[in-house]
Image (cartoon, helix red, strand yellow):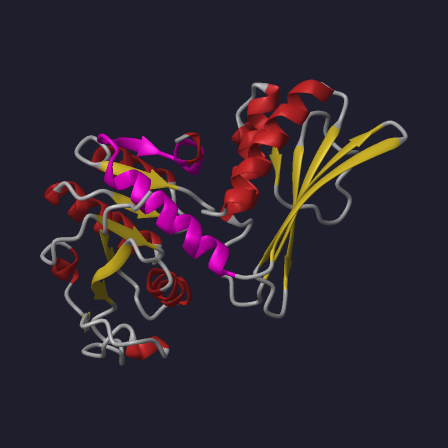
Amino acid sequence: MTLPSLRVALPGASGRMGRMITTALAETESMTLAAATDHPSSEFIGLDAGLMNGLAETGVRVAGDKTALTTAGADVIIDFTTPAASVDHARLAAEHKIPIVIGTTGMTGEDARILEEAAASTAVVWCANTSVGVTILSRIVEEAVKSLGPDWDIEIVETHHKHKVDAPSGTALLLGEAAARGRNVELSEVADYARHGITGARKDGAIGFGVLRGGDVVGEHSVMLFGQSERIELTHRAIDRMIFARGALRAGRWAAAAAPGLYSMHDVLKA
């Protein structure tokens, strides 16, 4: 079945994920780049978004004005920028009723509130990780924790490249939320983010987090479930960042046809 063409607006075009999404679009017959923006001080302003990435010319030049995202006839905005920029773009998307996919991590509770407000006017897919594999892993974690019961200890370990600025990663927190749902508790009430010095025995019911940073690791996440004389390890390793770009495009196509509301990758994969 031939899918109708979908036009994508891309903020943060010169960033790591912006470049990946531009490349993924070039590989996808049914989706095209409609607009690309970057920080006004970016050295890439005015360049063709395709040529900037060693691809064929797209005819879309990188703009420094965010309004370019809403004036090019885009069907969806795909945003992997910064928390401040993402909520700004969500407001803009809501104003113009353009669906938006946000994969930015490090968002605060106030940021989440703004996304909820935007979702009253347009479809907002907010996902800490657009990988199909991670989305499935989170489902498995929730079901495993629910089935194993409260006597099993839960630890989540994540590894990323040395340039990542937030910790734990959004994906680790997503997996922590899945584990907490499996126990019918709030993650904020049971999370243990740091251990140092004389900490005492492990708290019953805690969900622990370990963070590793180094090299150019794309992303690795392991959920370890410790029982008596046995252990279960559930792991996802991202080998190529393109998995996130392809997942984002899948989310973008889904969002373009969705009613206003706040959604996750779970909703995307149910389709």
Q: Which residues are magenta?
A: 241-268
Question: At x 70% / y 46%, what residue is drawn?
Answer: 195
Residue at far front of view: 1
In this view of the protein, can residue 161 be seen by the observer?
Answer: yes
Q: Is residue 63 above or below residue 29?
A: below
Place residue 141 in its image quadrant: top right
**Which x, y percent locates residue 137?**
59, 37
In front here: 30 or 99? 30
**Which x, y percent locates residue 10?**
26, 59
Place residue 239 in its image quadrant: bottom right
Magenta segment, prevailing SS (helix, strand or loop) = helix
Q: Is residue 243 shown in magenta? A: yes
Report the quarter where the C terminus lies. Answer: top left
Q: Is residue 78 shown in magenta? A: no
| 258 to the left or right of 219 | left
Q: Is residue 12 above or below residue 167?
A: below
Question: At x 29% / y 39%, what residue is drawn?
Answer: 255
**Which x, y percent locates residue 252?**
31, 46
Residue at far right of view: 229
In front here: 109 or 72? 72
Question: At x 68% / y 45%, what residue is drawn?
Answer: 235
In front here: 133 or 202? 133
Report the quarter where the N terminus lies. Answer: top left
**Which x, y percent locates residue 77?**
25, 51
Q: How many numbered marks have been drawn onto this rendered protein structure?
A: 0
Question: At x 50% / y 43%, what residue is drawn?
Answer: 132
In this view of the protein, can residue 190 be seen by the observer?
Answer: no
